[in-house]
Amino acid sequence: MRFKADEIASVLQKEIEHYESQIDVREVGRVLEVGDGIARVYGLTGVMAGEMVEFPNGTFGLAFNLEENFVGVIILGDYLQISEGDEVKSTGRLLSVPVGDAVIGRVVDPLGKPLDGKGPIVTSDTRPVEFMAPGIAQRQPVREPLQTGIKAIDAMTPIGRGQRELIIGDRKTGKTAIGIDAIISQKNSNVKCFYVAIGQKESTVATIIEALRKQGAMDYTTVVVSGAASPAPLQYVAPYSGTAMAEFFMYNKQHALIVYDDLSKQAQAYRQLSLLMRRPPGREAYPGDVFYAHSRLLERSAKLSDELGGGSLTSLPIIETLEGEVSAYIPTNVISITDGQIYLQPDLFFRGQRPAMNVGISVSRVGGAAQIKAMKKVAGGLRLDLASFRELEAFAQLGTDLDAATQSKLDRGYRMVELLKQGQYQPMDVIDEVLIIFAGTRGYLDDVPRTRVAEWEHDYLIYIRDQQHELRKKISDTKDLDDASMESLKKAIMAFKAQFATKLTDSEKPKADTVPKQPTTTPAAAKPAKAKAH
Amino acid sequence: MIEIAYGKRSFAQRQIDVGAQPVAAVYAQALIDAAQAAGKIDDVLVEFDSFISDVLDTNPKFEAILTSAQISPDEKNDLLEKGLGQAASRLFLNFLKVVSRHGRLEILRSIHQAAHALNDRLRQLTRVQVASAAPLDDAMKQRLTDSIRNMLGGTPVLETEVWPELVGGIMMRVGDTVYDGSISTRLEHIRQKMIDRSVHEIQSRRDSFGTSEGN
């Protein structure tokens, strides 16, 4: 680009005219010591807690500790360039990040600087990184569903818009996969997504971004990255700045989803900072306010009242446990803050049940309010049934002789477990989920061999989509499963079953004596059987 | 008009021991109070200045002995008596002995700074560090003193220094506040504004630069 001589001249002219009157007034201090991402600064007498300060090389810091004789500053950037005696300027501003549509589809660091090489983020909209959560009057109860596209979650621990649902589990149990699938699933829902990667390997983050891009999810997603190599202050700030970006949409009558991956690493970064700043250590050496660090963050997720536009921010914090220890400090804290948790277990994961969700202890405290009517109808007793199946399963391993009722309950359970398995990056439409769970809970799969359940499911969805288009459209439009459509769905399933039976080999065909002719047992009808089994 | 050379007392080069400051302030207060009672504040401060610059700075070994923990307070007292007994005033020597008895000789420099700060407050002096690109003449200094007095009150004490890298104008520092009227800062601002403007220009007419990829 060429400079425009007259424009430049006018800028210079104006500057020169103002030269006499303008004096740059700033408050300064001096670096006493620096290292490990923090600095102690002498001076800065008027600096306020949380205020941004600037180092000579342009790096910013935050006034973290105000002490009698010096100010403790956390350095948001490269602290190796800062040396003792450097002048530190106070800026009179709070840390803020760019927000709005300009950040969508970008990969940024916790200060909102682009990391994806796609040029600067040009927007005049910014929001402070630390922001008070909306109060009681500004909120309303969570009522709209946020579809994660994962059968097990949407059916048993439904997540509503504005809810905080914790994803907790050991390493390598598929925690991130759930968050990513939930993001991919928002493709047509007009929910803006934010993925905050804290203290993760850069290679892992690159893989995730690539996966999001392949699935077309980067069109509505922002990734905030502070990798394992980032200084602790940046890892500590990352979730707050991600929330600031997401909040913008909530306060502008839109919906947003944010995944914090993961908050255990953030707590560790905060512990490091606090110990370096000589704040007293508490349990597990975490500082006393680590609970507040997480609670003030997660409280910012909300469903706003209609007067404020009814926007929402849903958050999916992730916590990594060690050896399934949920009673450690950070897991208990975050469990108590959130509105429910999805608990992932390694033994389920290695048994091939993915997502490896432990149904018994996973809950959603919002519950049915965050489900569409159709899902509420079909998935009503599913959680309890599955939990009682787990009990029976353990019991059945002991004895060999089982009465018919118990056996059929076990068969149903095995098929439901099979049915709830779902691959990564394959989120489903909620109507498909309803159709599948209907077939499973109503016992239409009881005579399908366990190994063929996945195939049955696949073919069944194609069949309904292609041959029962009207029915599917009706359910999809009303989001309800009324008696009429339930009847036609039953008929459709029977027709499909006849078609599928031709695919089965003889040995796989159901034996006449074990199968009820009309498998119409409803969960309600199955209850007495359960009582007998005990 | 009061003026002293910036030189060694430059803020940027002064040693700061934040841990020692609260303790140093107590000793400094005691010294100033005693000197005030005797009506000899200025004399004592001059003596203290000279002790720091003429005795400690020129005899590092003497300072090492004074601050060493291996030498007992009694020995240090003897040393002070013998070494300074003739030259020092009774008041200042007693002060040194008190500091020595409490094993605080290693914070003597901090006490020195604190004493000056206390004296400044007592006499309502405002220390102003002034840096300019070229040496200031007396008329200029007088103007500066007058305007600072109007602005901040008290009696300004100028500590001047020449920084050629400022290009022009002056930079003033009062306490922790810097008043920067230098050409170099101004140039930097203009440079930043031109960059901002160019970026804005590019972004606002991005379409003419082809692809809309980016954001």
Image: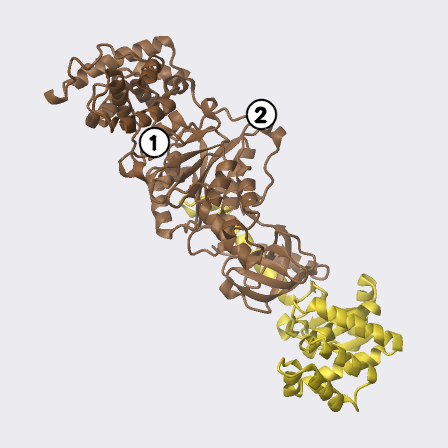
Q: Are marks 1 and 2 on the same chain?
A: yes
Residue B202 visible in image = no
Kindly identify the amino acid type of the residue bearing the numbered disc 1: Pro
Check disc 2 and report the residue beneath it. Answer: A306
Residue A270 placement, left or right of B157: left
Residue at 15%, 16% (x, y): give it. A511
* Vertical order, A279 against B50 (above or below): above
Q: Which mark is residue A427?
A: 1
Q: Provide the chain ID for the residue under circle 2.
A: A
Residue at 38%, 29% (x, y): give it. A360
Circle 1 crowding by C-alpha within 10 Å: few under 14, some 14–19, many from 20 = many
Residue B74 visible in image = yes
* Vertical order, B192 against B132 (above or below): above
Residue at 37%, 43% (x, y): give it. A170
Quarter of the image for the C terminus of chain B: give it: top left
Looking at the image, how many numbered discs can be counted on the residues? Answer: 2
Q: At which x and y percent is residue A453?
A: 23, 25
Front-lying residue, B74 or B161:
B74
User: Looking at this rendering, what residue extends furthest in the left direction?
Assistant: A506
Q: At which x and y percent is residue A446?
A: 24, 19
Kindly identify the amino acid type of the residue bearing the numbered disc 2: Asp
